[in-house]
Amino acid sequence: MGEPALEHLRIRFADVHRALRAAVERQARLAARLTRPDLTPYCVTDEQVDVLLGEVHAFTDAMTGPRLPRRSEPEAERELRRRASADGRVLPLDALATRFGLSRAEQDALLLAAAPELDRGYERIYAYVVDNLNRRLPSVELLATVVALSEEDRDGEGRLGEDRDGENQDAGDRLGEDRDVGAAARLALRRALGPTGPLRRYGLLRAHGEAAVDLAQELLPGPGVLDFLLGWGTDVGLLGHDPGEVAPPDPRLLAPHLSSDRLARLGRALGAGRIDLAGLWGRPPDGQLDAVQALVRAAGASLRALTEDPEADLRTAAALGAVLWIPTDDLHGEPRREHADAVSAALLRSRVPVCLTGLRPWRPAVLLATRAYAELTVPEPGFTDRRAMWSAALPDLHGPLLEDLAVRYRMSGGELRAVASVADAGARLAGEGRPEPVAGHVEPAIATVTRGRSGSAVRSITPRRTVDDLVLPDVQFQQILEIASAFRAWPRIAETWGFARRSAHGGVKALFTGEPGTGKTMSAEIVTGMLGLELLKVDLAQVVSKWVGETEKNMETAFRQAEESHAVLLFDEADALFGKRGDVKHGTDRYANLEVGYLLQRLEASDGLVILTSNLKDNIDPAFTRRFHFVVHFPRPGVAERRRLWRLAFPREAPLAPDVDLDALARLDMTGAGIAAAARTAALAAADGGGDAIGMRHVVRGVTRQFQREARLLRPSELGPHAHLLDAASQG
């Protein structure tokens, strides 16, 4: 790309050089009236600047080697673009202009700023134009003056080609006209070259040093800009970045419920100036962007996000006619008080339209008293809306798969875009040039986008067990299957059949009770696997805190992580966390009861699948029990269940000796976890003894060790004909 890029710069620099020569001629006319012979040695003379202009023009003219046949510059530029397009390429300057929305004048300013890095002769020319030898670097004044003259030249209104001594107009008259020519253009360019203009806002030009006045501010190209212009392969996306810019959304993926009349009216009021502060509350962080983008779309404005400097953000939003978006979830609480006060103080001094978003409202009274404020609680998208969003993101999906995804996942527009992109890439990669159907790649894409967000309070578990591994009596087995079915069906009956209006309980809640090792945690894993979701297990040691208020905060984090990951939340052995509320006899009892009350409310509010396990059902507060849709008691397995558990405990690949008596082992009173542990111990004993198979003596040794771990006594009579192996197992 180097040769076409250089040829393009040569063509464009010819235009820039004409404007630069015009600026020199203009300055020469002014200097002719002010020059004193005794000061001339300390200045750049007319003759010197004329030579310098010739040298820099010759340099850029020779950048591409031998000249092409002579043609007009616009024609040459069009021909160059046609050649690049035929090769499937874009000229670097054009790519830069497209990526950052640069006008022709802004492109010329960028070239002028980059020119001293090509030839130092530009520095003395620039000093001549601004009549100051101490200002050799490109400044706002220099760029605005030269580019304005270039604009006049293209419009055919300037006098750039006339002789400096003009026969029909004296120097004084011409100087007065110079002051008028391009004045409006120079003012417009001063604004474009300011901090809110695209060149500096994206970092394509950076301020060098400090200047007393803005006109004298020197500007240099940002890192990598010149290399890119020269065609040296820099990625255009790395050249500039505006941290406050928010890209407009794909309108196809805006949730239909965000086009409600109430939100549209609020947006129109914000755009018309009837209000200048809007609050959109109730949406989780990953859905707030969708809501605020729908609002500004109704307002007919662009959107900018808060960065580290609220006042600078407000100035930029004002200059661009944009709405400033301020997420407020991090502004609550004492640790963020200083930042919240800074944001509030900046908003008090401004009337720039602002949209606040948060899961819960942030309403400083002083802001509500000073600004014109209105708010709206944004609901979660319903099943019909989610189905429409999935269909828009992945048009190839239809039928049961589409409905199933809409049931299981409540995704924001950003997440849906990510899923669609990852699924499309997976289909293209698997097809090796001929894309496979995208439907088969949606589930892995969802896992890529949503999973792996576990933190200190929760641990991610990828379900590995299936229904075939579940050994329960028929009643409990059917209840486990019903939980998965109910979770899939709930959105339909809640929204389509209207049950959501009759119940304050969202989602599905299940309580598993029973002795340790009876399959409660495994059943939670199996239900999660049936739904194709991720299981997040709460680490109670990290959640429960002795400090007042910390347990609630940790619980909120756990629920939020599960909701953002679209995961099943599991509280294993939750007796301590969800225990009965007691009478207030001590100060700590009051806070413990408050924690339980908070958890009751949070459990109700969750729209996901939440599973609690408890060793003792009687330890669970009755107020919790009433909120569970399913309460499943896991009994100790009977003989038939134990025989199947023993069969499943040994993988198909395990070398099981013929003498292993599963019927005799099934008569032992053991739980599923105990049987699995005994089988592992037996396998280790067989491998340690150098045997080729797991024999009955190894299994008896495993059972003996498991009884010892449970502080139980294994009597010989329980082993029947294999009682003689017990002595060997005890000695081993």
Image (cartoon, grey):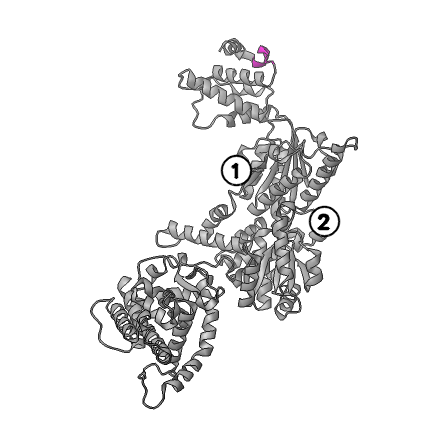
The location of residue 124, given as percent across then percent down, is 32, 68
Highlighted range, magenta: 713-719
Question: Residue 645 versus residue 685: which sits nearer the camera?
Answer: 685
**Residue 358 drawn above or below residue 544:** below
The location of residue 16, given as percent across then percent down, is 34, 73
Q: Tell me the residue at 39%/53% (across/down).
A: 428
Q: Which residue lies furthest to the front in this view?
A: 38
Magenta stretch holds residue 690: no
Q: In which quarter of the image is residue 25?
A: bottom left
The location of residue 465, given as percent across then percent down, is 52, 35
**Residue 432 drawn above or below residue 179:** above
Label 1 sits on a secondary structure element that is: loop
Q: In which quarter of the image is residue 498?
A: bottom right
The span from disc 2 to disc 1 (Cα, nearest Å) is 31 Å
The location of residue 429, given as percent across then percent down, is 38, 50
Does residue 303 appear to the left or right of 63 in the view shown?
Answer: right
Per the rendering, the mark at residue 463 is: 1
Q: Quadrant of residue 36?
A: bottom left
Does residue 162 appear to the left or right of 184 in the view shown?
Answer: left
Q: Tell me the residue at 39%/79% (across/down).
A: 152
Circle 2 is placed at which residue position?
503
Asked whether residue 474 is in view, the answer is yes
Q: Tell me the residue at 38%/82% (across/down).
A: 158
Question: Residue 610 versus residue 485: which sits nearer the camera?
Answer: 610
As shown in the figure, which amino acid type bears the numbered disc 1?
A: Pro
Give the class, few, some or many, for how many residues have Cα within 10 Å of label 2's Cα (few <14, many ≥20).
Answer: few
- Dot 2 or dot 1, earlier in sequence: 1
**Residue 545 drawn above or below residue 661:** below
**Residue 448 drawn above or below residue 134:** above
